[in-house]
Amino acid sequence: MENVSAEERDRDSYLRWQKIALEQLGYVINLFFTLSGAVLAFAVKTMMESKAPLPACAHCMFHASLLVLGISIWSSLAANITRAIDFRYTRRASHARWKNKPEEHDACQDKACTFGKWTWWLFYCQTAAFGLGATSLCLSIWIGYSHKI
């Protein structure tokens, strides 16, 4: 087996886990996007087929859940876009560092960091909106139809 320094081993380990973390973030963003879309479609289909009206508070909660689920979908789309832009600027920063262009590297790195922060903010917004929207939908259905369940 080849002699590998502890520093090289640690660097390789870090790069491997960094790659896994980036992949997982993409998977989770897309998972919540899919779930939000499915719950929103379920809610709309359920209400279109329902013959009994919801009480006023459940009706308001139901419509609020649609809005919040829409925000979750929008946030996931925006998170994917900012993530792609972050990768583009990270690639450009890496290329500038390779070509020994420190000013270009710093500018691209700053943009990549900004888009990375936006991605994480949108991810948190997406997950919170999904949780709130799904909870509101469940509560509105429970309030409106608990006597039938």
Image (cartoon, rainbow, N blue to C red):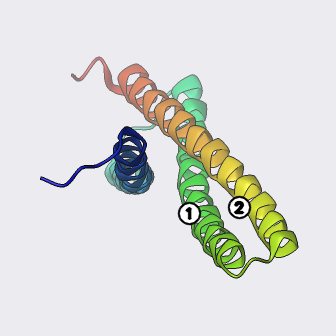
Label of residue 104 in the image? none
- Tell me: 81 left or right of 35: right
Q: Identify the residue shown where x is 55% and y is 48%.
A: 72
Q: Is residue 30 above or below residue 93?
A: above
Camera-side residue: 71 or 96? 96
Mark 2 is surrounded, within 10 Å at the Cα level, by few (under 14), some (14 to 19) or many (20 or more) other residues, namely: many
- The quarter of the displayed image where residue 143 is located: top left
Q: In the image as oriented, which residue stretches furthest toward the right?
A: 103
Residue highlighted by disc 2:
112
- Tell me: 96 left or right of 42: right
Determine the secondary structure under disc 2: helix
Q: Is residue 41 visible?
A: no
Amino acid type, callout 1? Leu
x, y percentage for residue 23? 38, 56
x, y percentage for residue 66? 54, 46
Camera-side residue: 94 or 65? 94
Q: In the image as oriented, which residue stretches furthest toward the front?
A: 3
Mark 1 is surrounded, within 10 Å at the Cα level, by few (under 14), some (14 to 19) or many (20 or more) other residues, namely: some
x, y percentage for residue 139? 43, 23
- The quarter of the displayed image where residue 88 is located: bottom right
Marks 1 and 2, how far apart in space? 18 Å
Residue highlighted by disc 1:
77
- Tell me: 40 left or right of 93: left
Determine the secondary structure under disc 1: helix
